[in-house]
Amino acid sequence: MSLEGRVALVTGAGSGIGRASAVALAAEGARVAVGYRGNKDGARETAGLCEGSMEFNIDVSSTQSVAGAFDEIEQAMGPVEILVNNAGITKDGLLMRMSEAAWDEVLDVTLKGAFRCTKRALPGMLKARWGRVISIGSVVGTTGNPGQANYAAAKAGLVGFSKALALEVAAKGITVNVVAPGLVETGFIAKLPQAAHDALMSRVPMGRSASADEAAEAVRFCARASYLTGQVVGINGGII
Amino acid sequence: MATRDEVVTSLKETLVDRLKVDAATITEDANLFEDLGLDSIDLMTVVMAVEEKFAIEVSDEELEDVTTLGQAADLLSAKVGTNA
């Protein structure tokens, strides 16, 4: 198992792609810190699927919560070597009707949350001269999607963020990549308005959505791949 | 109050332990980048270690002119003096 003993933190791991990523990393031997904000039951269930894992409450929209959670993880498991920035939220609406709050909240969790966690994780990775930062982007960060200007901006932001950081730490044994899924069957997608769901599906050449496990396969790949950095791995059934 | 010597010692320790710089090459006049092979991330790593140890903070702007170990020690020890 190529990630034997490595400590991985997956934020938003109580369900969906986060859970599947935790399971995929655990299958490679990683010890997973299962991050959750509200979904404690889900996180416990995820932890039950990952040998050697523990759950940690981490609200990525709070610098204080992130700092506290990292302190706890470091004490209980050791420094985070693999960070999966998965936590994200949507607050959909057409831009002309979008409140500033809906914009700010989505950016604060989905984009700035990754900034907070990554910044906190980096010193340990630099010290170890080994690290993996994997952020979950989205195909809508490239293609756009009506009703998701905030979410698309946040996901596109993760790409720029990751490419810049990849250059900063390339020589330090730390890789930084984005896994950008298309339509994945998770509770998250199920909550999309039907029109948005249909619009996305009509653009998928494979004509079907992905399972969360199929998306997590790319997370596993990014965690293992040692010469892959600054890249966006699209898991989208052929959407170009 | 920490002395400049303590800061220099701390800088050297970090360079050797954390960044695997050959101790024999470290002098106060050595250029951190050209002689010791550091890059900007390495400099940040060293500075952050000293910041943490002495509970001080330096800004990125202040670091812009730092090219030698001696200059870094001057800057950091001055902070220790004012913040301690």
Image: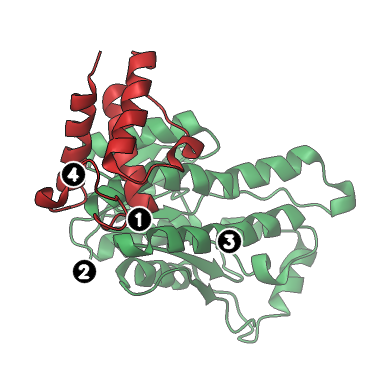
Chain colours: A green, B red
Q: Chain of mark 2?
A: A
Q: Chain of mark 3?
A: A
Residue A75 badge: none
Image quadrant of residue A237?
A: bottom right
Tell me which residue sits at (42%, 72%) in the image: A218
Residue B27 badge: 4
Residue A160 badge: 3
Spatial distance from mark 4 to mark 3, Cα to Cα?
39 Å
Spatial distance from mark 4 to mark 2, Cα to Cα?
41 Å
Count residues near mark 2 (Cα–Cα under 10 Å), then give few for <14, some for 14-19, many for 20+: few
Note whether residue A18 is visible. yes
Observer-side mark, 4 or 2, equals: 4
Q: Are marks 4 and 3 on the same chain?
A: no
Whether residue B49 sits left or right of residue B57 in the image: it is left
Tell me which residue sits at (62%, 42%) in the image: A108
Examine the rendered structure and indicate whether residue A59 appears above or below residue B67. Answer: above
